[in-house]
Image (cartoon, rainbow, N blue to C red):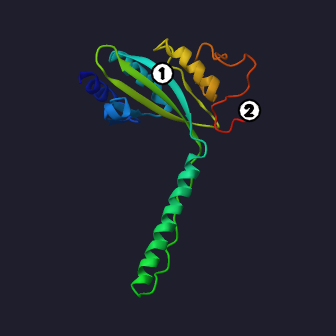
Amino acid sequence: MAAVEQVKTALAGLESAKVAATAYGKKGFHLDVGVAPDDVVAVAEIMDRAGFFIEAVTGVDWLGEQAAKAAEAKKKAEAAAKKAAEAAAAEGGEAPAPAPVKVPAPGPDEMEVVYDFSHYQETCRVAVRTRVLRSKPELATISAVFPGANWHERETHDFFGIRFIGHPDLSPLLLPEDADFHPLLKDFKA
């Protein structure tokens, strides 16, 4: 696929870009790209030069995900230690002292912005992801590169509160004009 190779080559020039090929039949896209928030405009320019158009821009709220993953890791480690102790006791030996459970400290809660691109001439889809802190959910707009992103960024701002710096008009698109809430945040209370 020429478009995939062209994008991979162009993204190799970005230090923050992490590119992974995926199975289109399982994931719905050919490349999964992770970049730093400062590189989203550069990625949009690369995608534009490679003949892609923007399909969608959306957000994902990761509130509590790190803590939930840490709790699950702790639970699995404790279960493994208990199973090892039971196996040792069943063999007549003395059960070893359980190792202390090491659980990684949860990182700051983040929100993710996902850009879906499709190629005009080939069946080729690329998902580009970047993460921003919930405490400062902002990154540059790509609407100067892809004017169609204007609407998507406004919708993402409405629902997640992510600010797209340089966007010409982040007024509410689907919410009431006086809305001071973002209903797709996990901590939103109606």
Disc 1 to disc 2: CB gap under 8 Å: no
Query: Along the line of sight, which residue is nearer the eye, 169 or 72?
Result: 72
Query: Along the line of sight, which residue is nearer the eye, 92 or 145?
Result: 92
| Residue 55 screen position, x and y as percent | 44, 19
Query: Along the line of sight, which residue is nearer the eye, 59 or 14?
Result: 59
- Residue at the location (42% across, 81% down)? 88
Q: Which residue is mark 1?
A: 56
| Residue 14 screen position, x and y as percent | 37, 31
Q: Which residue is mark 2?
A: 190
Q: Is residue 139 left or right of residue 88?
A: right
89, above or below 66, in the image: below
Disc 1 residue type? Ala
The mark that comes first in sequence, 1 or 2, is 1
Q: Quadrant of the N terminus?
A: top left
Q: Is residue 68 visible?
A: yes
Q: Residues within 10 Å of mark 2 (few under 14, many from 20)?
A: few
